Image (cartoon, grey):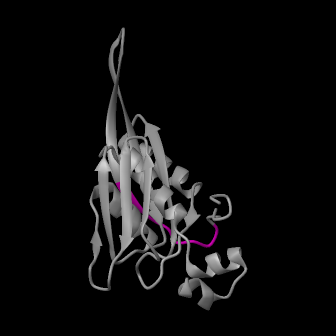
Amino acid sequence: MASIRKIKTTDLELKDRLVAINRVTKVTKGGRTFSFSAIVVVGNENGIVGHGLGKANEVTTAISKGIEDAKKNLIKVPVINGTLPHREDASFGGADIFVAPASHGTGVKAGGAMRAVLESVGVKDCLAKSKGSSNPHNVVKATIEALLKIRDAYSVSNERGVSLEKVFKG
């Protein structure tokens, strides 16, 4: 299902958000060597989002590598009237998260890494909770996994081969 929603980067205006920067130390015979890893989320705030990880000896290089990696991992998410169609749970590593739709005017009730992903995808109103690990790498990946599971009514009706009205009637 994930391969169906993959998006090409051509003709997209993507905005990037830096989620976290890690300083990594490697101890060698000559002393300590510092490098940086950056996790970045890109999106067009209209249903397309991607995440990437960049590693380099300088922060700016790590961020730019993360942006390039994120552009290779874009997915399409159904966003209806600024919120999500239904509630979804997901987990990745030690991070367990859930995202749920909210009424207009609620805002994005999410913390840290989840907020960056949800705002990049274009969600204006939703409720989200991160349970378990707060590691930003795993939280971002779990949020992307939850967004991949979300389906809108049109795709459900096409998959089942029934009319849109029958999907809503149950």
Residue 170 vs residue 103, the one in the foreground: 170
Residue 57 in picture, x, y percent from top left: 41, 34
Q: Residue furthest right?
A: 161
Q: Judge from the rendering whether residue 135 lies leftward or rightward of residue 68; answer left or right.
A: left
Say whether residue 60 is visible: no
Residue at point 34%, 47% (across, down): 136
Q: Residue 33 sits in which quadrant?
A: top left
Q: Residue furthest front?
A: 170
Is residue 63 placed above or below 151 in the rendered structure?
Answer: above
Q: Residue furthest top?
A: 29
Is residue 87 placed above or below 124 in the rendered structure?
Answer: above
The part of the chain drawn in magenta is 10-18
Whether residue 46 is in magenta: the answer is no
Marks counted in the figure total 0
Q: Where, quadrant-wise, is the N terminus in this rendering?
A: bottom right
Residue 1 vs residue 20, the one in the foreground: 1
Residue at point 45%, 38% (across, down): 55
Is residue 149 placed above or below 63 in the rendered structure?
Answer: below
Residue at point 48%, 54% (across, down): 51
Q: Judge from the rendering whether residue 121 lies leftward or rightward of residue 162; answer left or right.
A: left
